[in-house]
Amino acid sequence: MLGVNVAWDNEADARRFIETYKLPYPVGRDTDGEIGRRYQIEGTPTTFLINPDGSLYGRSRGAMTEEEFHKSIDALLSQKGKP
C-alpha cells in the first residue's frame, strides 16, 4: 500500500496527519499535481486497487469504511491465479 498526498500545502501538515492517524504505509507528496493529472484524480481520497500484474483492478472515489476497504482487498485477492 502507498499513499500520495495531494491535499496539504506543506510537509509539516502532511507529517502531522500521518502521525495522528498512524498510517502504516509510506506516503509521498504530489507537489506539482502530476500524479493527480496522470491518474485523473478528481477528489480525495481516491483509492486504486492494482492487480499483481500491475493492471487496474478497481478505483473508488471518496471515503471508504474499513469494512468496505477489506471487502475490496478480499475481492482482489480472490482473483489471484484466475485469468
Image (cartoon, rainbow, N blue to C red):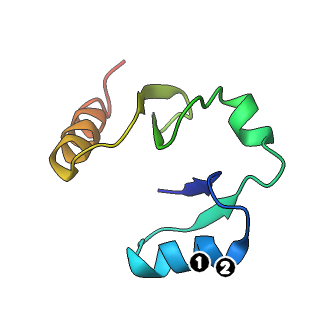
Mark-to-mark CA distance, 1 and 2: 5 Å
**Residue 71, percent from left and from top:** 18, 39
Count of numbered circles in the view: 2
Give the residue drawn at x 65%, y 26%: 40
Q: Is residue 72 left or right of residue 33?
A: left
Q: Is residue 38 left or right of residue 51?
A: right
Give the residue drawn at x 29%, y 29%: 79
Residue 47 falls in image quadrant: top left
Q: Is residue 19 left or right of residue 79?
A: right
Q: Which residue is mark 2?
A: 12
- Dots 1, 2 in contact, CB < 8 A: yes
**Residue 38, percent from left and from top:** 74, 30
Neighbours of disc 2 within 10 Å: few (<14), some (14-19), many (20+): few
Q: Amino acid at mark 2?
A: Ala
Above or below — where is 16 with respect to 31? below
Report the front residue among 81 and 67: 67
Give the residue drawn at x 80%, y 40%: 34
Q: Amino acid at mark 1?
A: Arg
In the picture, the quarter occupied by the C terminus is top left
Q: Which residue is mark 1?
A: 15
**Residue 10, percent from left and from top:** 73, 69
